Image (cartoon, coloured by chain):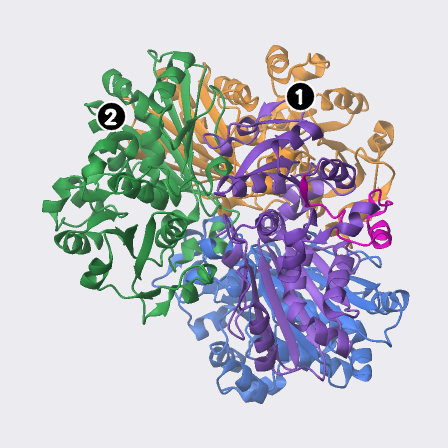
Chain colours: A blue, B green, C orange, D purple
Amino acid sequence: MIRVGVVGATGYAGEELVEVLLRHPEAEVTSLSALVEKEVPFSELYPRFGKKISLVCGNLDVDEVSADSDLVFLALPHTVSMKIAPRFLKNGKKVIDLSADYRLPPETYEKWYGTKHCDTGNLSDAVYGLPEINRDTIKAARLVANPGCYPTSVILALLPIAGWLAEAGVEAIVDSKSGATGAGRKAVVSLSFGEVDENLKCYKANEHQHMPEMEHVLARAAGADVRVNFTPHLVPVRRGILSSIYIRHEGLPGEDAIHKMYEDRFKDEPFVRLRPAGQMPQIHDVAGTNFCDIGIKVARGMLVIVSAIDNLLKGASGQAVQNMNIMTGLDERMGLI
Amino acid sequence: MIRVGVVGATGYAGEELVEVLLRHPEAEVTSLSALVEKEVPFSELYPRFGKKISLVCGNLDVDEVSADSDLVFLALPHTVSMKIAPRFLKNGKKVIDLSADYRLPPETYEKWYGTKHCDTGNLSDAVYGLPEINRDTIKAARLVANPGCYPTSVILALLPIAGWLAEAGVEAIVDSKSGATGAGRKAVVSLSFGEVDENLKCYKANEHQHMPEMEHVLARAAGADVRVNFTPHLVPVRRGILSSIYIRHEGLPGEDAIHKMYEDRFKDEPFVRLRPAGQMPQIHDVAGTNFCDIGIKVARGMLVIVSAIDNLLKGASGQAVQNMNIMTGLDERMGLI
Amino acid sequence: MIRVGVVGATGYAGEELVEVLLRHPEAEVTSLSALVEKEVPFSELYPRFGKKISLVCGNLDVDEVSADSDLVFLALPHTVSMKIAPRFLKNGKKVIDLSADYRLPPETYEKWYGTKHCDTGNLSDAVYGLPEINRDTIKAARLVANPGCYPTSVILALLPIAGWLAEAGVEAIVDSKSGATGAGRKAVVSLSFGEVDENLKCYKANEHQHMPEMEHVLARAAGADVRVNFTPHLVPVRRGILSSIYIRHEGLPGEDAIHKMYEDRFKDEPFVRLRPAGQMPQIHDVAGTNFCDIGIKVARGMLVIVSAIDNLLKGASGQAVQNMNIMTGLDERMGLI
Amino acid sequence: MIRVGVVGATGYAGEELVEVLLRHPEAEVTSLSALVEKEVPFSELYPRFGKKISLVCGNLDVDEVSADSDLVFLALPHTVSMKIAPRFLKNGKKVIDLSADYRLPPETYEKWYGTKHCDTGNLSDAVYGLPEINRDTIKAARLVANPGCYPTSVILALLPIAGWLAEAGVEAIVDSKSGATGAGRKAVVSLSFGEVDENLKCYKANEHQHMPEMEHVLARAAGADVRVNFTPHLVPVRRGILSSIYIRHEGLPGEDAIHKMYEDRFKDEPFVRLRPAGQMPQIHDVAGTNFCDIGIKVARGMLVIVSAIDNLLKGASGQAVQNMNIMTGLDERMGLI
């Protein structure tokens, strides 16, 4: 039995982590912490956990949590994680960080997150927790940087052709649509029901902080620069990201050839599913699951790739548990199927 | 041309008022004010008004607004209106207040809104702006208290039988369902899309501050006490209130008799529509309109009355403009059909 | 390992059954059938089952399904089940029927479902599958009639006071709000997104076919007639039923006393959760779970009871699996927590 | 007063037409027709029109409708309009057709709509009813082909740079997101609330029948071929289209230069609003209006253009009334602001 602590349990990702871990046959949640006014039973904060969990959620005490845990999930805002993670690592605990703090080289991090990185020592050891790329290094990692939700949906969708993109110097144009939980549990007017419902909007076109994460990871996978132009949109669903990716090039391989590249790359992946050529996934196919579904199609000389994930699962907490499974030698799918 | 000022133009009700007034052939919006950091063109705050209105929205200056207006709408939070209204009245302006500040006797107000009323002088002159009851007194009013959204939906639904309810000592049980704009434009987690979407909840059962408003107004209409038990619910729609009302009594008249009471009461009302007996209205029938639609049915000895309104129109800004039309001698339906 | 067949696998309840059963450690789905044009892999019909299930969904062959199953779930339309169930029973299979066909006495069935019952023999042996009432008889049952979604939400909410209601001759007034999947997967304009979204409507007030089911079951539990006035509403959520129940009586016990009755009745129930007095459940608390959450409150002499369930789980497929667990001697909670 | 008939009044576009025309000060709706079982008051079919319109909706009688009308709107399915329009034209009536039947050259029509055009005579005289391009020819037109919803949103967004696109041989990549009313009022499972809510999906990538309409119209405007790659998505809103357009080219002018091209092109257009450079429109800005809002931004060498319309207004019925205003010499904005 792996004893785990969830730090930042009251946000959407933290709550989802608890949900997934409660179903996991080999994990035991031993502590829940968050910024709360006073200790309170978690099932009082979130009644959906009544008769399922009796833990109290209190403010974080790193040593206390360490004493009860083999592994700790940090579901904290970026810039906060990098202050907390080193203390757990020093205590000899494995850490899976769901924030952006350990995903990027320090200079890129500073540029996009507006603050100097304060834990560059651990940063250089951190492993980017996308199992489809780094399964082997995740196995041995002490600190895993769990990927962002948008990057998960885009990197997986481009992975089989990343080498070709790099070589041919072709850019990918990515139009992503995300549900509102992707922005976290926040008291802001722009996320209120009255503003989001019956609305669609584009934001941070080609300026979103997840774009450098995509390019950084794809470049490492391809061995050369890959250019991704990324425009996210907010849509009125609670969960889910649909990324539509457009690639135009005269040298584009045919649909069959591309489909085969995807098939070869993903056929043994437990959480990536490829649709038959020409068929596209939708959010309903993946909501509530840890799968990333991918469809590809070539029409009029344009390659369209569509990927769908649940932003709170494969885009956050499900993937974090997948990483935990790998780090602890369990069946990667445990608790997730 | 009636010159009007809108005070509190940035909330949902204020924004809707501007929308309605722009379509009104005999009203000219001369000023918009709200709590803003600095003066800003209204169409910059709300781009939906681009190429429609060129007014700037600034902080309130009562004398400046008074100079440009014959009539002022106050779309302010309760407890704020009663500090502002007297200053406009002193300047000789007609005032339509959309808050709760002038709807209740002072002691009831204090009990339900938790603060002493500070303008009891004008309060005693204020006319409750439900045209279906007070059309004649509204005509001559200087200060109209525009009804609450829930009360509009419930009072109209009970009006034709209020006398019978009072006489027979029968209580009405009201289950109302409201869209999220009813709570205003606010930065609170509980109104965020992630919390409201795919959710339903009951709140303040038999303790909502709109309940005394219903009972007060119905009692005055009936000439004796009418008891209303009122439980509101939040549902994931932007606009609309559906109120389902249940009445059980051995002495209940038959469906035909009750239907006739409603027909007689409302047949000349421009904004109340009665369905054939047994048919019920839905939100889609009234969304975007100033109508209150009502259906009645008797089955197994129980009377079910269902009313539907758009909470931002008949429940707030539409009704406010209806009141303006009456106060200024215009066709009551002007700008609203 | 219990071998189960799912008949009617393509509707919302059938699909949800497959979902739940795949996570169940002691059940193995051995066949899926439905009205389909030709045999097709289930994961092709519903890609969310890709890499999870490899079964093909074909038209029903009772003997074939019987050969592979210990127990069969029927997720069929009412009036169809009663033609199929006897054939499985004859083959010695246990049957859990999710339709209305085995829930009511034959004359009540005929009155509300408009057709004569054609399997009255098995009907008289069928056990109403609400574990909170019939746990012991379910254990030994060959044929379980899985309760309706509305009845589950209402019967559980009234169960602790059913005796008092019967004795005092007090009626319950029930206002239920259901998500759209409750109506099934159907091609009708009235269930289309354009008609349901941003809409609320009341239907079949005091005339819904689930009302006699509530009264029948509560009367048996109370030992005397219980009167329920029931009005359902359609609201724009996918899943979930919130039932608000109103009870007025001079002889009403106090809130504490009532709360204690509920506490005593439900404290050992694995899937019913009672809120502290005065607190009400919401759909988010139960969506995706097999729980029924209940809140009670007394204010101004009126008792308000609110219950929340997921219509596809505790209201259908989750409860069916709970019944399977009981019938087969497994831990009742297996696969459901 | 212009007398108008609405043929096909029961679909979403037809219903919206009636709504807009009722507010129009110079138009009188004289007849409503549709495929109905028997004549029925329109306000009985759609209670939202109660106390607003007393017309009966019956099956179409071309001569009767002609007798009462100066102008007829056809809100019919494609392939139906081309059988009806010629009969009204023969009767000397002006026709505004909302279907696709008169928008394309016959061979393109046949290719994309799968049927031979049966009224090529009138087709060659028809004017494409996008006022921003064809205002002058619309003035004199007898038959106007009202543009499709997607094409309106895309053509307007590309119009100011169509010449440059053609000259530079640059393709536009268009990712459009549409609300569900765009698919019409239909009884199909895939449009049901249970399937559309909380879902996002891509369909007909680079194969949608609106793509040739965009290319045909833009090519005529540019004087040379313009290539548009178009992928539509269905999103869970009732109304609205947001089109995000991506253009990559080394020769791309700077943001200021492009913004000025848009400003110059649209500054006098009553129903196109350009945002300040870098700001993007959203659906809420245009829902319920006849505006097309456009934002542009250049970042990392990519031009992003976002346009937003209400698919039932500027994308259908609002634009149809705008065309009526132009054809009849009225102020183009009448009834639409």
| Residue B40 visible at all | yes
Relative to the observer, which residue lies in front, C39 or A123? C39
Placement of A301 over or under A137, stated as above or below: above
Point 75% across, 47% down: residue: C46
Point 17% across, 50% down: residue: B115
Query: In the rendered structure, which segment of residues is drawn in magenta?
Result: D93-119
Query: Which residue is label 1 attached to?
Result: C101
Image x and y of residue A228, in percent: 69, 77
Q: Amino acid at mark 2?
A: Val
Q: Amino acid at mark 1?
A: Asp
Q: Residue furthest left?
A: B121
Query: Which residue is label 2 attached to?
Result: B226
Is residue C85 a member of the stretch shown in magenta? no
Distance between the alpha carbons at the discs numbered 1 and 2: 44 Å
Where on the picture, by quarter, is residue D192?
top right
Describe residue B23's horizontal placement relative to residue D207 as left or right: left
Placement of A152 over or under D199, stated as above or below: below
